[in-house]
Image: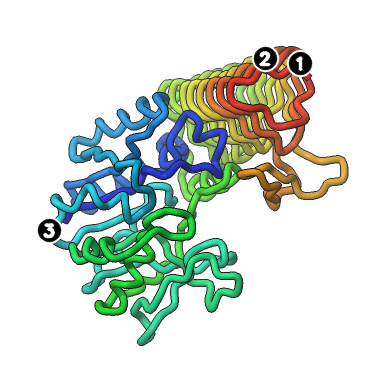
Amino acid sequence: MKSVILAAGKGERLDPLTQTRPKAFMPILGSTVIERIISFLEELSIKDIIVVVSKDLPVEYNEFIYKLNKFSNVKIVMQDTRLYGTAAALLPLRSEINDSFLLIYGDLLIEKEAIENILNSEYNSILGVEVNNPKDYGVLNIRDQKFLDKIVEKPENPMSNLINGGIYKLDQKIFDYIDKIGKSIRGEYELPDALNLMATENKIEVVKYNKTWMDIGKPWEIIDANKKILDVEKSKNNGEVEDGVVIKGKVIIENNAKILHGTYIEGPAYIGSNSLIGPNSYIRPYSIICGNNRIGASVEIKESVIMENTKVPHLSYVGDSVLAEDVNLGAGTLIANLRFDEKEVKVNIKGEKITTKRKKFGAIIGGHVRTGINVTILPGIKIGAYARIYPGAIVNRDVQKGEFFKS
């Protein structure tokens, strides 16, 4: 059986993180979302894997796409950007698929069992997941207790909390139904529209799943996703820990990481490979330091995801934040994570202020950002990729990609 992973989405709600890395490559501990999915497929002996990405890629995406070359059984296919949408992404594969195939959205946090359950269905099938906010998704209406009747996209009054989980087993007939659909109200060719047509003439089983599942769509959900996986992992120490280091609780220390004297780590926490921590650093619970990072003297990290090759060298505080790859914070950079009124922190997502539903949330910092010394960043601020923040600045508004922010 072939497996197709769709990874061509722009991930606009994850901006500014997706200015330099694809949505499907958001980090999960020492891996990424899509690499986890591919590893599960390999464990299930699925040897023929196609990853669909967009032709219209920022040049920075290439280093992440090239990571897939380590999987010998993965083929990269480009989606024609003249046609947008999940259904359009399948069109380049029409000549390659002549039997049933597995289809997975590449931005899902799942466990292997979700894929196994779909594979075990004797019908065409779709994963059904129960969530607390169904109106944010495609809601599944069911007939005869287990077959798909219709997918209703983001209804104001959902009939149930069972939603489209983004994993399917389909046969080649799906291409005939894709041919029959038009553009959605978003101007895209949507797979749910084709599935709704298919369901009128074919049985599509709704396979219910109630374990780990998450659609990572907003920046703070990267923290939530990593917390979910860290909670089920076991302690491990493959690095070097100097005398005078205190480690409490579950902590994962990967290969070639080094923890210097005076550092205090409270688990659960993750220290990625080739990272250097300390001396005298304070790593608090649910800190995810992905790999090849430098966390320096008298630095405090709390419930944050710090992506690869990032440096927080000295005298800084990073709380409840997401830092992309190759960020360098100047000495004394402080990220505030609590409003004076202690209300939920809001973040600007696609021009609208959205609540994070967190009383504590810091900043979202894009790739390759640099801050000068003694910079202060207020709660809920987004800083675009390649931005430069002038020494002593108080960042009280979102900063655009490449902007030089002084005040």
x and y, in percent, of residue 110 in the image = 41, 54
Q: Is residue 262 visible?
A: no
Cα separation, mark 1 vs mark 3, equals: 60 Å
Check disc 1 and report the residue beneath it.
374
Check disc 3 and report the residue beneath it.
98
Crowd around label 2: few <14 · some 14–19 · many ≥20 (10 Å): many
Check disc 2 and report the residue beneath it.
330
Q: Amino acid at mark 1?
A: Asn
**Towards the viewer: 268 or 387:** 387
Of all residues, the one furthest to the bottom in this rendering is: 144
x and y, in percent, of residue 46 in the image = 19, 51
The quadrant the N terminus occupies is bottom left
Cα separation, mark 2 vs mark 1, equals: 7 Å
Q: Secondary structure at mark 3?
A: loop
Q: Earlier in the sequence, mark 1 or mark 3?
A: 3
Answer with left or right where residue 316 lies relative to residue 111: right
Q: Secondary structure at mark 2?
A: loop
Q: Amino acid at mark 3?
A: Asn
Answer with left or right where residue 79 lies relative to residue 11: left
Q: How many marks?
A: 3
User: Are dots 2 and 3 in contact, CB under 8 Å?
Assistant: no
User: Are dots 2 and 1 in contact, CB under 8 Å?
Assistant: yes
